């Protein structure tokens, strides 16, 4: 698992400790850590050319504007958009989905129209549609997953009707890890006359994503999950959609001409970027895109797939531990949620925390998914380019401590000593 030996040292936080133990960071599905060069780009922006964009005509304002628009080009290139203007900067995935729900859904949906969502969606790809359905009379229909955490295209075919206007689904589930067949879903949904939105919050950071190959109408993702800062993300959309949509927010900078009683708007994407944007966020996200591009998304995916395979094998050896989601690492990413019989997820996370291990316990913003699994909460360990097999070994040793506290009779005895590298 060669990638991380080189990469790990570039992340200052991974050299820190917690409770006197070196940090083992296994919560990248919540947010990723940042490499030194990304942190440096943030400092450089504020020290050298902090100014508002698209306004000033002095040197640093022009430099900031150029860097902001260059960052748009970098993000567009990263996902192979046809042009930078197809990328709207937002606060993140959540705001990008809300943009579509309000700017498109509120104006276009009629009573009885149908929106298809999977039952594994993050709340950010569920609640906006509930709100819009409530306002328009549109109906939500749910595309359920099977016992292995997978959705079938036959089920989509069954759900699609002449009233389906939108199919919105995650590319990778943030809990089950499942890669959903988004390209084929997009082909079938669009053939049926529906639009397709892909929540790519958990895919763009972890694998090559080409929006032209995906064939969807809208793709949403966040900078902070891909080595960039918080508070910045993007909506990619086919340019003709952006031209047709109403603005989502009104205010400064998104206008051409303002009268007292009406306004005309700029071209996309600026029509959707009212007010002072997250200038630092966008520019620093651009630095993160440069970083990931240099390492290579194919290499990152290969590393994570190998490490996920290793983690799945190790975790399944623990008695009473159940992994939710596919067991084949080729079909899934490195967000691994699990339950341990008789032990509360928060207790697990607390014991692991004492060992310096950062995992997340809870519903991970997917309450319906957890209800569907029949559990209130799970523990989630999630991987990224900087994780190593040693991190997995530390997790397994930590889980052995959990068993020692809560279920000593289930300990196999290999947890602490018998594993690779321990
Ligand atoms: N969708 C998925 C699948 C996610 O994992 C997340 C983040 N946990 C989001 C949407 C929301 O992203 P953000 O909080 O960055 O808007």
Image: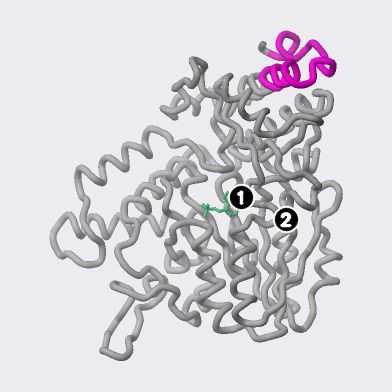
Badge 2: few (under 14), some or many (20 or more) residues near its Cα, within 10 Å?
Answer: some
Residues at discs 1 and 2 in contact (Cβ within 8 Å) = no
- Residue 359 sits above or below residue 296 on the image: above
Task: Report the magenta residues as a range.
Answer: 397-420
Q: Residue furthest left?
A: 58
Between 290 and 185, the one nearer to me in the picture: 185
Query: Where is mark 2, residue-wise?
Result: 368
Badge 1: few (under 14), some or many (20 or more) residues near its Cα, within 10 Å?
Answer: many
Decide if residue 167 is on the left or right side of residue 56: right
The stretch drawn in magenta includes residue 417: yes
Between 5 and 422, the one nearer to me in the picture: 422
Q: Which mark is residue 97?
A: none
Between 295 and 55, the one nearer to me in the picture: 55
Residue at horizontal 82 percent and vertical 23 percent from the top: 317
Residue at horizontal 55 percent and vertical 65 percent from the top: 97
Residue 245 coordinates in the image, percent (x, y): 49, 80
Residue 3 in view (yes/no): no
Residue at horizontal 50 percent and vertical 44 percent from the top: 226
Image quadrant holding the C terminus, namely top right
The secondary structure type at the circle numbered 1 is: loop
The stretch drawn in magenta includes residue 409: yes
Decide if residue 210 is on the left or right side of residue 331: left
Decide if residue 372 is on the left or right side of residue 80: right
Query: Where is mark 1, residue-wise?
Result: 203
Residue 166 in view (yes/no): yes
Label 1 – label 2 distance at C-alpha? 21 Å
Query: Mark 1 or mark 2, which has the lower sequence index?
Result: 1
Residue 9 coordinates in the image, percent (x, y): 45, 24
Residue 206 coordinates in the image, percent (x, y): 59, 44
Which of discs 1 and 2 lies nearer the camera? The answer is: 2
Image quadrant holding the N terminus, namely top right
- Residue 208 sits above or below residue 356 on the image: below
């Amino acid at each position: 698992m060669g990638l991380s030996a080189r990469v790990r040292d570039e992340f200052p936080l991974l050299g820190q400790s917690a409770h006197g133990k070196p940090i083992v960071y296994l919560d990248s599905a919540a947010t990723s850590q940042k490499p030194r060069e990304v942190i440096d780009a943030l400092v450089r922006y504020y020290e050298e050319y902090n100014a508002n964009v698209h306004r000033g005509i002095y040197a640093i304002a022009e430099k900031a504007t150029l860097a902001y628009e260059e960052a748009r080009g970098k993000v567009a290139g990263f996902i192979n958009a046809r042009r930078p203007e197809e990328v709207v900067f937002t606060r993140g995935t959540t705001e990008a989905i809300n943009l579509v729900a309000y700017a498109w859904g509120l104006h276009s949906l009629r009573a009885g129209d149908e929106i298809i969502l999977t039952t594994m969606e993050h709340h950010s790809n569920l609640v906006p549609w509930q709100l819009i359905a409530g306002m328009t009379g549109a109906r939500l229909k749910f595309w359920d997953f099977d016992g292995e955490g997978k959705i079938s295209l036959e089920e989509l075919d069954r759900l699609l009707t002449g009233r389906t206007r939108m199919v919105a689904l995650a590319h990778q589930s943030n809990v089950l890890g499942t890669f959903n067949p988004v390209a084929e879903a997009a082909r079938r949904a669009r053939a049926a006359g529906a639009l397709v939105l892909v929540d790519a919050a958990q895919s763009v950071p972890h694998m090559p994503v080409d929006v032209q190959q995906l064939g969807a109408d809208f793709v949403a993702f966040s900078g902070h999950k891909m080595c960039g800062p918080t508070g910045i993300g993007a909506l990619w959309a086919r340019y003709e959609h952006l031209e047709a949509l109403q603005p989502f927010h009104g205010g400064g900078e998104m206008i051409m001409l303002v009268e007292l009683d009406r306004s005309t708007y700029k071209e996309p994407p600026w029509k959707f970027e009212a007010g002072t944007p997250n200038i630092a966020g966008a520019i620093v996200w651009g630095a993160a895109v440069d970083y990931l591009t240099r390492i290579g998304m194919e290499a990152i995916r290969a590393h994570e797939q190998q490490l996920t395979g290793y983690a799945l094998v190790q975790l399944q050896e623990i008695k009473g531990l159940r992994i939710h989601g596919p067991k084949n690492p080729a079909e899934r990413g490195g967000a691994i949620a699990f339950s341990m019989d008789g032990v509360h997820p928060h207790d697990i996370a607390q014991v692991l925390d004492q060992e310096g291990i950062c995992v997340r316990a809870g519903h991970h913003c997917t309450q319906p998914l957890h209800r569907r699994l029949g559990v209130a909460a799970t523990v989630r360990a999630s991987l990224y380019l900087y994780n190593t097999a040693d991190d997995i070994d530390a997790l397994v040793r930590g889980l052995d401590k959990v068993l020692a506290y809560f279920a000593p009779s289930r300990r196999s005895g290999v947890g602490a000593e018998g594993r690779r590298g321990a």
